Amino acid sequence: MKISVAMAAYNGESYILEQLASILNQLGEEDEVIVSVDPCKDNTLNVVKALAELDSRVKPVEGEGKGLIKNFENAIDHCTGDIIFLSDQDDYWVEDKVETVMRDFVERQADLVLHNCSVVDGFLNPIDGAQDFFGQHGSRPGYIKNIIKNSYMGCCMAFRKELVREFMPFPENLPMHDQWIGLIAERCGAVIVFEDKPLLLYRRHGGNVSATQHASLPKMIRWRWRMLQALKAFPSADEKGEKQ
């Protein structure tokens, strides 16, 4: 099976090469890394283009500057692989991540795999007292559970290409793309595997594009309300087909 990695990048030159190296070391010759780069204030796009000249598996595409969720949508749109991994620009893939996740797709017939991760600082050192992600969030499957308290974090997620038609295009004003993907997968009856092994070093460095702190209660309520409204309005893949 061909692997695509969909990465969204923005002002990421500090860590993106280290992240890409950790990914490319685990991919085959026919695999690809799609890096959608929103307009930046730094040299992220030039860094990615320079690497692409050395490694044809790296494929930079220019984002439209409409934010993180649309940037990921752009990256996913350009993926041609059978299995799509999502990736942030500043983490680090543990050396057996791809092998372990792909085993879950083959042996456990998964449609979506969500794996655990370890929280580290900007230098990849463990943060004292930090729980792994699954422990911190009580991560487990369940549609209602994951509306109330989300388990689905994009940088720890991979899914079959066929699932894309179920959750895209992303609705406007979506609060979180990764929670959306997980909830749609749950709703359509996909086989979801929660892999307990930490397969990612989740870097917290103060400049992350994704949120670094827990949202306030009013914000969480607004986000959940917007998510529920989007879920209510979003047609299934079969319904989309009937309208065409």
Image (spheres, rainbow, N blue to C red):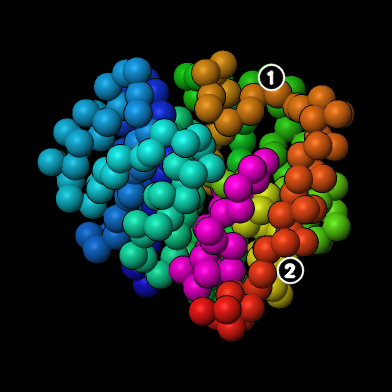
Closer to the camera in the image, 127 or 53: 53
- Return the x and y of residue 50 as percentages of the image width and height: 17, 33
Closer to the camera in the image, 24 or 49: 49
- Return the x and y of residue 81 as percentages of the image width and height: 36, 66
Residue highlighted by disc 1: 128
Disc on the earlier residue, 2 or 1: 1
Q: How many neighbours does mark 2 have within 10 angstroms: few (below 14), some (14-19), or many (20 or more)?
A: some
Q: Does residue 108 appear anywhere in the picture? A: no
- Return the x and y of residue 194 as percentages of the image width and height: 68, 59
Side of 116 where 163 appears, left or right? left
Side of 189 where 86 appears, left or right? left
Q: How many neighbours does mark 1 have within 10 angstroms: few (below 14), some (14-19), or many (20 or more)?
A: few
Closer to the camera in the image, 24 or 77: 77
Q: Reply above or below: 199 against 235.
A: above
Closer to the camera in the image, 244 or 31: 244
**Is disc 2 in contact with disc 1, using a CB cutoff of under 8 Å?**
no
